[in-house]
Image: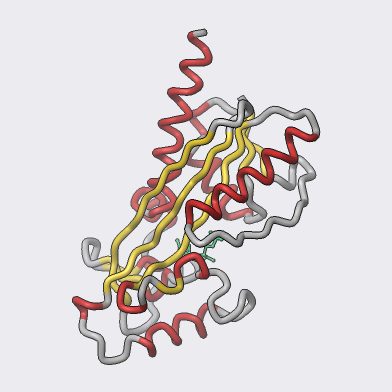
Amino acid sequence: MKIVFATGNEGKMREIRMIMSDLGAEIKSMKELGIDIPIDENGKTFEENARIKARAVADELAARGDKAVVLADDSGLEIDYLNKEPGVYSARYMGEDTPYSIKNASLIKRLEGVPDDKRTARFVCVIAAVFPDKTEYQTRATIEGIIGYEEKGENGFGYDPIFYLPEYGKYSAELSPDEKNRISHRGKALDAMKKYLKTKIQAFTDK
Ligand code: IMP
């Protein structure tokens, strides 16, 4: 079985290769397959956006007569006090090229005076799969936390430095990559997808 992950992000490719390594499947990036198509992520939900990406790449592969399982993810940060902003706009919040130090400072400012119990937030990740027979499957996972009062930690990326995990007594940017993969929204959604793919491979092998 060949798996294609619909992302241009090398960090995500590394993560998925690590998590899916025991599947025994070939895992390719869009770049490796020479797929460079514009994808309009205009969905209103993480589910819609993940599906849009996976379907676009699946259609391109089908047009080339190539067979693969296409996976795509969509993720973001939901802050309850801000009506779940930035949500599906997490990457585009204040502009795609704006440094995260500025985006993070803006979110902390917007929560000025808001007590701990109202600073609840979560990272969400949805993984969509499109199979060669056009059937689809999705997994979703979250990690709950609160928005801190300052930026802390050097690891991770994006909103990790303001995302405090009460259960672990640390900010997300203070977790090691291994620790983060084990508990993160993306790690858990990828793991659930891996379990499903294993049953699909088994069913295929049993035929
Ligand atoms: P995507 O690549 O379109 O899924 O955009 C996800 C955006 O959500 C990223 O650009 C970050 O702003 C935010 N995000 C998602 N996952 C994480 C995470 O694990 N840490 C920090 N920020 C994240």
Q: x and y percent of residue 83 in the render? A: 36, 74
Residue at (68% x, 46% y) in the render: 56
Spot occupied by residue 149 in the image (x, y as percentages of width and height): 31, 84
**Position of 98 relative to 45 (above/below):** below
Q: Residue furthest top?
A: 207
Compare residues 32 and 134 and report the one nearer the observer. Answer: 134
Q: Between 24 and 63, which is closer to the camera in this rendering? A: 63
Q: In this orientation, which residue lies closer to the viewer: 70 or 154?
A: 70
Q: Quadrant of residue 84?
A: bottom left
The residue at the point 63 percent across, 28 percent down is 132
Q: Is residue 71 above or below residue 45?
A: above
Please tell me whether residue 192 is drawn above or below residue 185 in the rendered image.
Answer: above
For the N terminus, which image quadrant?
Answer: top right
Left or right placement of residue 9 versus residue 32 in this view: left
Left or right: 199, with 147 as reference point: right
Question: In percent of the image, x 32 and y 69: which residue is there?
Answer: 121
* Rendering coords of residue 64 (x, y %): 80, 33
Where is residue 82 shown, x and y percent of the image?
Answer: 36, 78
Q: Quadrant of residue 165?
A: bottom left
